[in-house]
Image: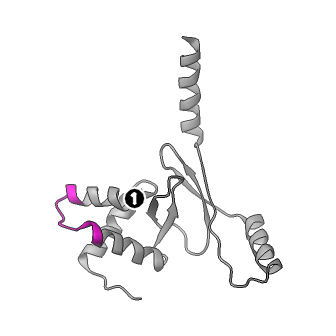
Amino acid sequence: MVQRNTWQRERVREALTDARGFVSAQSLHATLRDENTGIGLATVYRALAGLAAQGEADSLQSPEGEALYRACVSAGHHHHLICRSCGLTVEIEATDVEQWARATAERHGFRDAEHVVDIFGLCAACAATADSRAEKRDAH
């Protein structure tokens, strides 16, 4: 399905590019609403789905099950490390995962298999902050 490149879709793309890390459609819509764009939530959802389908946006599911999006940094299949605290996202290669997925699919008679691997954790800065808070709490 080819989507028309409307001004609304272009504005959603710009807002997604300006966002730090992965964001929800609701969060992006709130930003656009605060800018008085008049773009509705349904339009944001459609634009994000179209951008993801065309490879212009990464899409993943948060640990809570919410769909999150961000503007693509690199083309092609890739995976992410994502900080649960600040949203910092690092694109990673996962050669071992690629080989495992392909071999597992073949072993079970599947072909044209696809997979998604996103790893959630705390980045070094957020982990250091959490450790510092824990040390202060333990000292009291």
| Residue position for label 1 | 24
Q: Which amino acid does label 1 sit on?
A: Ser
* Helix, strand or loop for disc 1: strand
Quadrant of the rendered structure where residue 28 is?
A: bottom left
Residue 7 lies left or right of residue 104; in this view the side is left
Residue at 17% x, 66% y is 38
Residue at 62% x, 64% y is 79
Q: Magenta segment range? A: 33-42
Above or below residue 2? Residue 78 is: above
Q: Position of residue 3 (x, y in %)?
A: 35, 85
Residue at 54% x, 37% y is 126
Is residue 41 inside the magenta stretch? yes
Residue at 38% x, 57% y is 19
* Of 42 and 127, the residue lying toward us: 42
At label 1, counting other C-alpha atoms closer than 10 Å, the crowd grade (few under 14, some 14-19, many 20 or more) is many
Q: Where is residue 132 in the image (x, y as percent from the top left)?
A: 56, 25
Above or below residue 65? Residue 107 is: below
Q: How is the image coloured?
A: one colour
- Location of the C terminus by quadrant is top right
Name, please, the residue furthest toward the top. Answer: 140
Is residue 123 inside the magenta stretch? no
Residue 1 lies left or right of residue 7; in this view the side is right
Residue 54 lies left or right of residue 77; in this view the side is left
* Of 46 and 80, the residue lying toward us: 46
